[in-house]
Amino acid sequence: MFENILDQEHVVSRLREDLENQRLPSSLLFFGPALSGKLSAALELARGLSCFRGREWSCSCSDCRKHRTLTHPDLGMLGPRYFQQEMDASLEVLRRSRKDFARYLVIRGARKLTRRFDPWIWEGEESRLKGVRSSLDSLEELLDELDPAAGELGEKRAEKIISSISKESGSVLKAANLSHIPIFMVRNLAYWARTTGHGKAKIIIMENAEAMMDSARNAVLKILEEPPTGVHFILTTSKRAALIQTILSRVRPYAFKERDTDGERQVLDRIFREPSGEFRSLREYFLGFDLGAGEIRKHAEALADLVLGKDSQRDLSEVFSMLQKKERFLPLLEEVEEILRLRLRTKDSGAELSRFESLLDQLTRSRRMFESYNQNPDLLLEGLLYGGGR
């Protein structure tokens, strides 16, 4: 169990011990840097909670088979995620190899998206799914074809499936707003959690829990105060401080560390079988499927110089043009934040500490306004350039 959770042995061993000794609480918090394996660990824990046998990854019981393809009826998933980048990376693996591991990688990547549209999550709000249902149905048909149990996959058929999955998943992401967790989802979650499950346990994973709207936070708090028997809640976040204290007091924390370069390469080699060796991190690898990590870094360097009051020769029209695709905004903010923190650590700034603190606060506010309120990234960028840290 947890064989595929790489370079996080400290938290994996603790989870394994808590599970085997029946000391696992009903509510858990997985926190740590982005791309540190929090969701993968949550999904593996969900499989372990459902398994009636030895919990090995290769277990052939019906519960484990369903968890491996993310089709188990006792699993619920909510919250935003970097869906498009993960989907692009998984499909690239399938282009290079049609072996079972590649097929499962795509299946799991796609269902991390489609499971956000389970009927119980959107009950009473079905009108919001206009234009999404047909793409979701098409995706499920494609994933059934991709399942290793469906037999061998020829090169031409594989390329057609890859193209179709990319198209349909893109349509879903354009049509539905998954940037935050609204109150109606939490209310539906509370009802679903109290219905009878199919197996040993129900598991509800709320990814990036800091994206809850204020009303949703209060509703989640009520559930955590009196959790239904046999239900486990796993919240994940890369911003622990953004969660309200009353929620933090009701979950057991499990800290995921930031992987070093060797740890990142291990994930790229073993999970994505990345052959070039040119990427330093998962984040660079994922960004490479859009503009490219180097292009994002170039724009972020220019923005960091400008907000710090330094001269920059970069043409900002290129940055605004880049942001025509909204999904590039958060990677840009993250890159700027990383650059600022690096300069602060190395004291290569020429700016006062208070200016750095003000800028980092502004970056956090910009991210919240974009994720929670869908504010225009051009306006947020202008606010950062002309108001942040000055």
Image: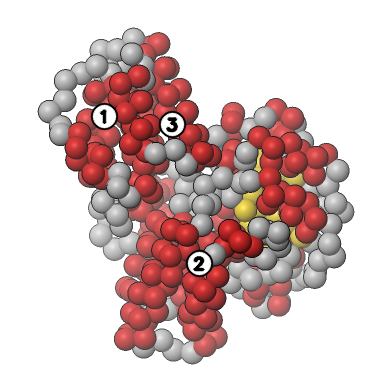
> Residues under labels 3 and 2: Cα distance?
29 Å
Instruction: Place residue 149 in its image quadrant.
Output: bottom right
The kind of residue tagged 3 is Ser
Please, is residue 126 above or below residue 29 in the view?
Answer: below
Residue at position x 25%, y 39% from top?
A: 320
| Along the line of sight, the residue nearer the viewer: 241 or 316 | 316
Q: 315 left or right of 51?
A: left
Q: Is residue 15 visible?
A: no
Q: Which residue is mark 3?
A: 366
**What x and y, as percent, mark residue 202?**
76, 60
The kind of residue tagged 2 is Gly
| Along the line of sight, the residue nearer the viewer: 361 or 265 | 361
Report the disc number at residue 303.
1
Residue at position x 34%, y 67% from top?
A: 92
**What x and y, as percent, mark residue 242?**
59, 31
SS class, disc 2:
loop
Please, is residue 14 above or below residue 167 in the view?
Answer: above
SS class, disc 1:
helix
> Residues under labels 1 and 3: Cα distance?
14 Å
The kind of residue tagged 1 is Leu
Q: Which residue is mark 2?
A: 131
Q: Nearer the viewer, mark 3 or mark 2?
A: 2
